[in-house]
Image (cartoon, rainbow, N blue to C red):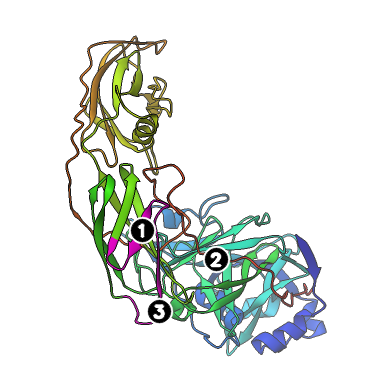
Amino acid sequence: MKKITSLISVATLAVSLTGIVPVTAEAEENIIYGTMNIPYSDFYKAELSGSINEYEVDAVSSATTSKWSKNGKGELFEGTYNQANEDGTGTILGVTYPVAITQSDLDSLGENNYNFTAMDSVPSAYKTVTLQDGKAVFSVVQSETSVIAEESTIKLSANTPWGDYLIDVENAPEMGAIYGALIKTSDGSIYAMWHEANIWRGEIAWSSGIKTSEPHGNNLPYENFINLMGSTINEISFITLDGYTSIPTNTYVPVKFDGNINISESVSGTGKTSFTAENFPDDYSKSYNIADNFTVTDGEISYTDALAGSYTLTISDSSGKYADMTSDFILSTDYMPAKYIGGGVIAKADGTEESDFTNFIRNISTVTVNGTDYSASGRGSIKIIGDDGKIDTSASSRDVKIFGNQGTYTISVKATGYNNTLDFNFETDGTSGNPAPVTTTNTNNNNNTTTTKANTTTSYAGKESPKTGVAGVAVPVTVMASAIATAFALKKKNK
């Protein structure tokens, strides 16, 4: 990480970036420091001044009943302030940030002083407040030192539930609470990011109008971010209590569109299935990828010796203009390659290849214990059956042991791509967790039956790749870019 001290004075910054006449030397003697509740529109106005896409930033409404209010130290949106609604939802109005203001200007604001709270010492970074026509105007952030994180890189994904794009900063410096973030592009545009809608635990996500809502039910603002598609990001700047932390980069934002991939599911082994790619741009130059034992042509997928499971078709634009698109599909089988042999152990069925058994264990999606389903993958998953096929008797759900009582448990194991479940009874003493073999019931139908279903799940390739039938054969497609660009001019504290 490299720290640079700017030689640009606060007065020069005020004139060149905000048009505000700097305070006189006499007035400087009366400057006081404190914090103000600064609405997003005021907080970002000077930051966006001069950008070719200059716009006003609004408040952020939330459909959730709790997250918007988490603004305490160490919480999700530390440093923000908000307003509650009668239904329990709320709106994040802006941030509580240090300021410098003369005593006379503060007195002129009267009760409309943005909830000014005095500070005992000069903050490391602040916004200078002046009055224009009796209204408070906030400068860009003033700081003696700001950070250019030259070792940090940006990882951009076009496949995220939180919008159209998501940026992770790899090898990020310690920044503490993030009060704002700016995305700057090579064409001279600057985009301001909101908390919850865009800023989340150091990540930045946004919608450019393709995916306009997220899993919590929040509608994502996108009108000001449409032109981010197809642009090149040359800097991301985070605003913290120490000033700016800048990440130089040269990251292209591929264009997304409202297209669809529809794939017919089929049987595992050797065979083929069909697919359609709809609403792709005319100049999208398609190239296809699934796995080594798959061949894809326009409209048809052929495969050899493919195990049961979920696979991902990725369609890429050879020109690099457009984002990748992906769609998952399942190859299924009625064959059951596993059996319960007692003692809490699942082993491969007689005559089964080791690869088939390993594939079944790897693709376990749900384990049902006494009628309760426990997901084996994804967020909140619980791994009841280990990679070795043994039941973990210490497994717990919400701090309650699943096998905490002595007795017999009825278990059903479901794996993606396997039409039949593995069902058996399992007995434990409930204390030491020692299992005892009991009567088992195994589903082991080795007749393959072709099952064809329409699959319309489509997404853009990103940082996560679905589990596949064969270890290592899925190709996770990530739109990444990380390069060091020219450092930007930084601001100096005006004492």
Q: Is residue 402 visible?
A: no
Looking at the rendered image, the disc whose residue lies closer to the viewer, 1 or 3, is 1
Going by the numbered disc 1, the residue's amino acid type is: Thr
Q: Are marks 1 and 3 in contact (CB under 8 Å)?
A: no
Q: Position of 386 compared to 249: left or right?
A: left
Of the numbered discs 1 and 2, the one sitting upstream in the chain is: 2
**Which of the 4 image quadrants contains residue 411?**
top left
Q: Residues within 10 Å of mark 3 (few under 14, many from 20)?
A: few
In whole angstroms, how far apart are the C-alphas of marks 3 and 2? Answer: 22 Å
Q: Which residue is mark 2?
A: 95
Pointer 1: residues within 10 angstroms few (<14), some, or many (20+)? some
What residue would you read off at disc 1? 295
The amino acid type found where label 2 is placed reads Val
Magenta-drawn segment = 280-300
Secondary structure of the residue carrying tag 2 is strand
Q: Which residue is mark 3?
A: 223
Screen quadrant of the C terminus: bottom right
Magenta-colored stretch includes residue 135: no
| Identity of the residue drawn at 47% across and 77% down | 321
- Identify the residue shown where x is 36% and y is 58%: 295
